[in-house]
Amino acid sequence: MRRRGKLELHIDALSAVSSESDNITSLMFRVGTNYELITEIMKSLVDQGLVKFMPTNVIDSKGLYVMTDQGYHVLCAATRLMKILNVEPTNLLMRSDIWRERSKEHEAQIGNIRGNPL
């Protein structure tokens, strides 16, 4: 397995969150990285407003990560860029059935806004 760059790891994390709300441990296994790195990635995504952290337990600060609308826009743009550049999407992005459905809805909305349905 080849090493993934920072961008690919962030896209994989976004893709993992797009399919369902998840806690940090589940995300760590789905993205295939260690706890320290996924924590850093998720903090970055939260700081950028792409993902929202929803606490479920105030005592030990556990919670779920949920994608925001802005996160869906970024993930859609990343997918389109991969198609334009003819780059294979990451394995996690390809497996995300829910993401594919939401991406189709999102692209249809963008087409309607621009006046040309896709």
Image: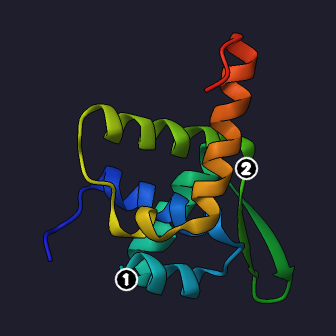
Q: Residue furthest front?
A: 117
Q: Is residue 70 above or below residue 110?
A: below
Q: Amino acid at mark 2?
A: Thr
Q: Which residue carries the number 1 mark?
A: 34
**Front-most of 88 and 29?**
88
Q: Is residue 113 left or right of residue 50?
A: right
Q: Which residue carries the number 2 mark?
A: 68
Q: Residue at x 49, y 35 (%)?
A: 77
Q: Residue furthest left?
A: 2
Location of residue 34 by image quarter: bottom left
Q: Which quarter of the figure is the N terminus placed in?
A: bottom left
Q: Which quarter of the figure is the C terminus placed in?
A: top right
Q: Is residue 108 left or right of residue 33?
A: right
Say which element carries label 1.
Answer: loop
Q: Residue at x 71, y 11 (%)?
A: 115
Looking at the rendered structure, the number of numbered marks drawn on it comes to: 2
Q: Is residue 118 above or below residue 13?
A: above
Q: Is residue 5 above or below residue 106?
A: below
Colour basis? rainbow
Q: Residue at x 37, y 34 (%)?
A: 81
Q: Of the two numbered discs 2 and 1 on the same chain, state the one appearing first in sequence.
A: 1
Within 10 Å of disc 2 (Cα), the crowding (few <14, some 14-19, many 20+) is some
Q: Tell me, yes or no, if residue 49 can be seen here.
A: no
**Front-most of 13 and 94?**
94
Q: Tell me, yes or no, if residue 30 can be seen here.
A: yes
Q: Amino acid at mark 1?
A: Asn
Q: Are marks 2 and 1 in contact (CB under 8 Å)?
A: no
Q: Is residue 63 left or right of residue 16?
A: right
Residue 48, given in percent of the width and then of the height, sits at: 60, 43
Label 2 vs label 1: CA separation?
24 Å
Within 10 Å of disc 1 (Cα), the crowding (few <14, some 14-19, many 20+) is few
**Front-most of 95 and 71?**
95
